[in-house]
Image: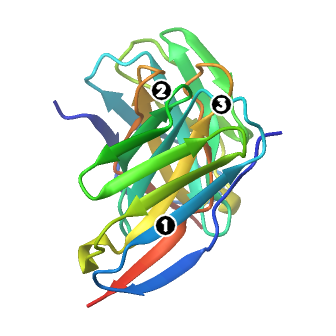
């Protein structure tokens, strides 16, 4: 059974720091992997989607990488800002295109001014 | 585009009551799903659909029913509400191979 793990559960950093959020999965047969942001009491906002055949995707200060062989994805946030404070979730689709996502528990990020 | 919309935003039920959570999308997406989010448990899949007339169970389907008569709508029915169904419910849609879009959620409390 596919399992998705995000460590650490919480992270606090000073403003301006570059940081990496980790996501690991147990089965390398994935269709795609998506990173989301969730603000308290709000829904999920899609940040980046990496297809199985891709190694990384970039959007602004965000860069997501995917290494299927090691079962890892990372979300790199450059020059962090207080507005980046939120919970970051990774989720993947298994080996087939079913629209079903398996989520990690998330990393709650606090960026201190 | 309104994207994915969910109604109601908040709901309080008594044990044993039934209700329907509404979900609609205007992006002509084939795939739609329902998730529940609970502290310490993350988001878990309840039911999903790969097209009108096609639905299947996810990880935690008990106590919930779905149908998909149109591409746009995917309602979630609670047959007889229980306190264990107190949660935040999210609906999502996608083309399958592209990113998934989530609605704003419904916060449900069952007393």
Asked if residue B12 is positioned above or below residue B105 in the image, the reply reads: below
Report how far apart the C-alphas of labels 2 and 3 lie in the structure: 19 Å
> Dot 2 corresponds to which residue?
B32
Q: Secondary structure at mark 3?
A: loop
Report how far apart the C-alphas of labels 1 and 3 lie in the structure: 22 Å
> Dot 3 corresponds to which residue?
A30
> Which quadrant is home to the N terminus of chain B?
top left
Instruction: Identify the residue at image location x=23%, y=53%.
Output: A60
> Which quadrant is home to the C terminus of chain B?
bottom right
Q: Are marks 2 and 3 on the same chain?
A: no
Q: Secondary structure at mark 1?
A: strand
Q: Nearer the viewer, mark 1 or mark 3?
A: 1
Chain of residue at mark 3: A
Residues packed near mark 3 inside 10 Å, few (<14), some (14 to 19) or many (20 plus): some
Instruction: Identify the residue at image location x=44%, y=75%.
Output: A109
Residues packed near mark 1 inside 10 Å, few (<14), some (14 to 19) or many (20 plus): few
Could you say which is closer to the camera, residue A62 or residue A97? Answer: A62
Instruction: Identify the residue at image location x=62%, y=74%.
Output: A8
Point out residue B106 in the picture as x, y percentages from the top left corner. Answer: 42, 53
Q: Nearer the viewer, mark 1 or mark 2?
A: 1
Camera sees residue A42: yes
Q: Secondary structure at mark 2?
A: strand
Chain of residue at mark 1: A
Chain of residue at mark 2: B
Report how far apart the C-alphas of labels 1 and 2 lie in the structure: 31 Å
Instruction: Identify the residue at image location x=61%, y=56%.
Output: A23
What coloring was used for the rendering?
A: rainbow
Q: Are marks 1 and 2 in contact (CB under 8 Å)?
A: no
> Dot 1 corresponds to which residue?
A20
Point out residue A52 in the picture as x, y percentages from the top left corner. Answer: 56, 28
Point out residue A83 in the picture as x, y percentages from the top left corner. Answer: 25, 74
């Amino acid at each position: 059974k596919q399992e998705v793990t995000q460590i650490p559960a919480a992270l606090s950093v000073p403003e301006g720091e570059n940081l990496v959020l980790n996501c690991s999965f147990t089965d390398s047969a994935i269709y795609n992997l998506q990173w989301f942001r969730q603000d308290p009491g709000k829904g999920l906002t899609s940040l980046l989607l990496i297809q199985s055949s891709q190694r990384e995707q970039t959007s602004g200060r965000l860069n997501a990488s995917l290494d299927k062989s090691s079962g890892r994805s990372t979300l790199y946030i450059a020059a962090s800002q207080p507005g980046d404070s939120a919970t970051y979730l990774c989720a993947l689709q298994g080996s087939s295109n079913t629209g079903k996502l398996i989520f990690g528990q998330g990393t709650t990020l606090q960026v201190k001014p | 585009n309104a994207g994915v919309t969910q109604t109601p935003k908040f709901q309080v039920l008594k044990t044993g009551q039934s209700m329907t959570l509404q979900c609609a999308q205007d992006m002509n997406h084939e795939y739609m799903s329902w998730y529940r989010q609970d502290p310490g448990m993350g988001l878990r899949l309840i039911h999903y659909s790969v097209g009108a007339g096609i639905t299947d169970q996810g990880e935690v389907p008990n106590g919930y029913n779905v149908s998909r008569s149109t591409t746009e709508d995917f309602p979630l029915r609670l047959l007889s509400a229980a306190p264990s169904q107190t949660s935040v419910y999210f609906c999502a849609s996608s083309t399958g191979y592209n990113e998934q879009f989530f609605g704003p959620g419904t916060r449900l409390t069952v007393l």
